[in-house]
């Protein structure tokens, strides 16, 4: 594992975008796994800016042949709701680059049979072979919506959201009661099937979860700890999120 610690959000966004850009330049038809949430927003802004800056050049950054797979989707929101993860990714990223909307894949949160939908999405992700998966981390150590207690062997499925997750995500909704109670999420084993994974964390409120994920035991009570079993994971953190790490015996780089 490699841990990168950045002093500023812009340096962090630039470092993650470098890895995304290298992935696309070496495989123009790369399969990208995309997260949603506040952490990932500066990275999408940086990638949009690189796309725009390079737009006029013959060797410009293009997403035209890339496919994207979302980690998760709320259950019960109308497809037109701006807070579906599909719409959040559209408005914050996809609509500003040349990645066709038809190449963006996500679980259908309004499906009449979420269990069947989850199985179909798991098969699609597995078949795609994700080259690079971007992940955030919850305050409770969740990855995607794999809340504490999720099996490390879990696949894409219907889950109940933890109370802490609903409280954290209430900022995106008019009232806390409007936050959906369920979601379809890629499972931990599904996420671990990606070739390369970057876990990004920003802020002091993530420091405990980050320390346990990187330096604690591998346990289903802290789902992000499962990443320790993956051969190619990079943790990209700001100094606040990294503040509870001891980093003894870890390949680290402070930028
Ligand atoms: C979102 C997702 C979640 C978030 C996590 C962190 O697709 O899967 O696991 O990555 O909840 O959210 P933020 O970045 O808003 O703190």
Image: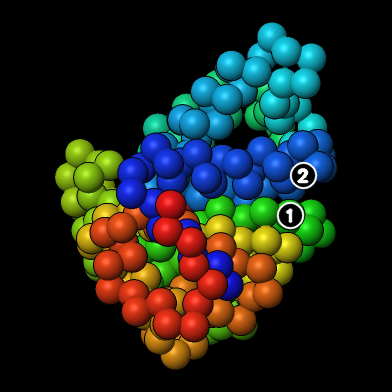
Residue 234: which quarter of the image?
bottom right
Categorize mark 2 by other alpha carbons within 10 Å: few (<14), some (14-19), many (20+).
many
Q: In this view, does 8 lie to the left or right of 226?
A: left
Which image quadrant: the N terminus? bottom right
Asked if the residue at tag 1 contacts the one at tag 2, i.e. Cβ–Cβ closer than 8 Å, the answer is: yes
Q: Where is residue 6 in the image (x, y as percent from the top left)?
A: 39, 51
Between marks 2 and 1, how big is the CA–CA gap? 6 Å
Q: Which residue is drawn at 23% across and 50% down?
A: 170
Q: Which residue is drawn at 35% across and 54% down?
A: 238
- Relative image position of residue 203 (x, y in whole percent): 27, 55
Q: Nearer the viewer, residue 32 or 18?
A: 18
Q: In this view, does 191 lie above or below 107?
A: below
* Residue on which the image places disc 2: 30
Q: Where is residue 128 in the image (x, y as percent from the top left)?
A: 79, 54
SS at circle 2: loop
Q: In which quarter of the image is residue 117?
A: bottom right
Would you identify the image quadrant in which residue 11 lies?
A: top left
User: Residue 89: which disc?
Assistant: none
The residue at 55%/79% (across/down) is: 228
- Camera-nearest residue between 196 and 249: 249
Helix, strand or loop at label 1? It is: loop
- Apparent side of residue 237 relative to residue 251 in the rendered image (left or right): left
Q: Which residue matches tag 1?
A: 131
Q: Position of residue 18 (x, y in %)?
A: 60, 41
Q: Which of marks 2 and 1 is nearer the N terminus?
A: 2
Coloring scheme used: rainbow
Q: Residue furthest left?
A: 175
In front: 172, or 215?
A: 215
């Amino acid at each position: 594992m490699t841990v990168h610690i950045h002093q500023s959000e812009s340096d962090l966004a630039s470092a993650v975008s470098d890895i995304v850009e290298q992935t696309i330049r070496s495989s123009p038809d790369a399969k990208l796994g995309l997260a949603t949430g506040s952490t990932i927003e500066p990275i999408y802004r940086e990638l949009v800016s690189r796309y725009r800056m390079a737009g006029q050049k013959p060797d410009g950054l293009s997403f035209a042949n890339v496919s994207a797979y979302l980690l998760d989707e709320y259950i019960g929101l109308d497809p037109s709701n701006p807070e579906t993860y599909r719409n959040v990714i559209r408005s914050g990223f996809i609509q500003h680059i040349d990645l066709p909307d038809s190449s963006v894949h996500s679980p259908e949160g309004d499906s009449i049979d979420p269990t069947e939908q989850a199985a179909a999405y798991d098969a699609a992700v597995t078949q795609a072979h994700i080259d690079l998966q971007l992940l955030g981390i919850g305050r409770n150590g969740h990855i995607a919506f794999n809340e504490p207690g999720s099996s490390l062997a879990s696949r894409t499925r219907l889950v109940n959201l933890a109370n802490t997750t609903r409280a954290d995500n209430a900022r995106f909704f008019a009232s806390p009661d409007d936050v959906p109670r369920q979601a379809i999420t890629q499972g931990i084993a599904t996420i671990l099937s990606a070739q390369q994974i970057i876990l990004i964390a920003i802020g002091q409120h993530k420091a405990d979860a980050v320390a346990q994920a990187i330096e604690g035991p591998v346990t289903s009570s802290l789902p992000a700890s499962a990443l320790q079993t993956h051969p190619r994971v990079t943790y990209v953190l700001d100094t606040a999120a990294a503040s509870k790490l001891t980093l003894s015996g870890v390949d680290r780089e402070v930028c």
